[in-house]
Amino acid sequence: MQKLRRTMLYVPGNNPGMIRDAHIYGADSIMIDLEDSVSLYEKDAARLLVYQALKTFDFGGIEVLVRVNPLNTPYGRDDFEAIVRAQPTAIRLPKTETADDVIEADELITEIEQKIGMEHGTIKLFAAVESGKGALNAAQIAVASKRLIGIAIGAEDFVTDLKTTRSPEGIELLTARSLILFAARAAGIAAVDTVYSDVNNEEGFASEVKLIKQLGFDGKSIINPRQIEIVNRIYTPTEAEIKKSKRIIEASLEAEAKGSGVISLDGKMIDRPIVERARRILDLAEAAKINVE
């Protein structure tokens, strides 16, 4: 089953209590931040804190990413040097604008892995696109490194770059979301949507989650544990969807056992894409701890 990333919970890299407790809320992934949520005066202390946390805390097997500072800042290279050694699942690369940004990060990780005797490719990459240039280059970014496991959109910087603001409907993000999603699907990696900053607007948040689910995103970056249940609920299949998916999978297995390439159910032909969607629904149900046996 492909790794599910319905919820990627942001955790400030300068808050030891939040880092320690982040895994208990039920998010699929944790993203510890060394970039925007950490002031310039705390960069070095936060980096050391995150390094020690990754080496010490038990995150209960949850996927952990660390968002570092860009390599064109005074903090980026030091972040890579420390975080690779702490061995999270992946490093999230902010403000990715070109394939060269990913290649530069890949080469630096390779250099550090070799230096400390770590197996090549241990540390994965997750690219965040936050500008019009990055959105236009999303297809090249998504295939720039075998380390890349996902690509995300960061909306706040993106709308600033476009000289606009975020609207409730998200029309200003539609093209970028589509470009990033197409790039992820072409590359076979995950696509994760941006954060929704108004944590008290649950109705607006739910509406946006329904939109990005319908577009095809694997999940959403979130900034508050209260948002986890909403995302997971919307991504959880209904009982009818699960029942129908099970019947589709059973029909496909029967056809396979008979050596037949033709799958039928209730007198209707079932195409392979329908079988793939059924498997995805059962994966989401299992992630929601629903017994699909």
Image (cartoon, rainbow, N blue to C red):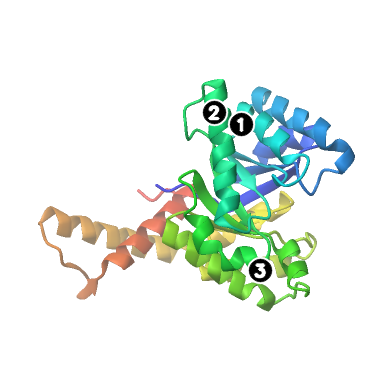
Q: Amino acid at mark 3?
A: Gly
Question: Residue 181: x percent and y percent?
Answer: 52, 65
- Residue 234 versus residue 94 in the image, above or below: below
Residue at 55%, 62% in the rendered image:
138
Pointer 2 local density, CA inside 10 Å: few below 14, some 14–19, many at least 20? many
**Mark 2 lies on residue:** 113
- Picture coordinates of residue 17, whole percent (x, y): 79, 33
Upstream in sequence: badge 1 or badge 2? 1
Q: Position of residue 89 (x, y in %)?
A: 56, 37
Please determine whether, in this image, residue 32 is positioned above or below residue 222. above
Q: Position of residue 49 (x, y in %)?
A: 77, 29
Is label 2 in contact with label 3 (beta carbons under 8 Å)? Answer: no
Tell me the crowding category of disc 3: few under 14, some 14 to 19, or many 20 or more residues within 10 angstroms, Cα based: some
User: What label does residue 84 carry, if any?
Assistant: 1
- Depth check, mark 1 against mark 2: the one in front is 2
| Residue identified by numbered label 3 | 132
Would residue 291 appear left or right of 76 to someone viewing this image? left
Residue farthest toward the right in the current orientation of the protein:
41
Disc 1 secondary structure class: helix
Q: Amino acid at mark 2?
A: Glu
